[in-house]
Image (tube, rainbow, N blue to C red):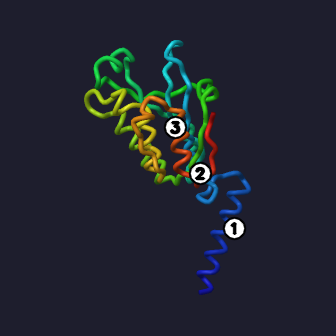
Amino acid sequence: MIASRLLTRLVTALLLALASLGVATSAQAAVQVHFHSFNGSVLWGRYPHTFVVFDGTLADGTRVNQNYGFSARNSAEAITSGDAAHMILTETQRTIGESNRHFSVTVSDRQYRRLLAEVIAWRDYPGPYYNLDSNNCIHFVARIAELVGLQAEVPEDFIRRPKAWLNYVTRNNPRLGASEIP
């Protein structure tokens, strides 16, 4: 009993010491998943798009700052031929700054690793995987949203409207405490 209390005090003291030095501990560590839409314009060369940003610190102190979206490798192929070659797309800091952040969710290290595995699965899917109507950036982000526990179905009315779809997800997940973006 005394040994157990002593061990608990030592661990607590160590965690407090690490915290005072700015070293991340599991209690402090957190990765945020931010859900973004980019308005884009068919006329100006960049289609509307949705993507996620992972930002934070893992329990071991590893800094996370990544973003992922899903896209066709060739826009013309995606528009004209159904299934098309695909890629995971990353955004520049400038584009992220120009996008709409709809809401954020905090995930555990384990959830973060599961999300990364999902990104890799989409990236490495064999053969053409992008389809403008059934497997586009919205479907990719919907899968990420589902993995973090959100209701994120993709009704037909939203399959080509990323901002409207994320507003729909916001409405269907009031626990997020987020507001729709006009």
Task: Specify few, some or many for label 1: CA neighbours under 10 Å numbering under 14, 14-19, or 20 or more.
Answer: few
Q: What's the residue type where badge 2 is placed?
A: Leu
How far is disc 1 from disc 3 in space, using C-alphas?
37 Å
Residue that protrudes farthest toward the front in the picture: 157
Q: Is residue 84 above or below residue 37?
A: above
Q: What's the residue type where badge 1 is placed?
A: Ala
Q: Quadrant of the C terminus?
A: top right
Residue 52 marker: 3
Residue drawn at x 56%, y 45% is: 170
Task: Specify few, some or many for label 2: CA neighbours under 10 Å numbering under 14, 14-19, or 20 or more.
Answer: some
* Label 2 SS: helix
Residue drawn at x 30%, y 30% is: 129
Q: Nearer the viewer, mark 2 or mark 1?
A: 2
Where residue 123 appears, x then y in whole percent? 36, 33
Q: Nearer the viewer, residue 159 or 122?
A: 159
Task: Specify few, some or many for label 3: CA neighbours under 10 Å numbering under 14, 14-19, or 20 or more.
Answer: many
In the picture of the structure, the residue carrying the numbered disc 2 is 176
Residue 95 marker: none
How far is disc 2 from disc 3 in space, using C-alphas?
16 Å
In the picture of the structure, the residue carrying the numbered disc 1 is 13
Q: Is residue 99 above or below residue 102?
A: above
Q: Nearer the viewer, residue 31 or 172?
A: 172
**N-term-proximal mark, 2 vs 1:** 1
* Label 3 SS: strand
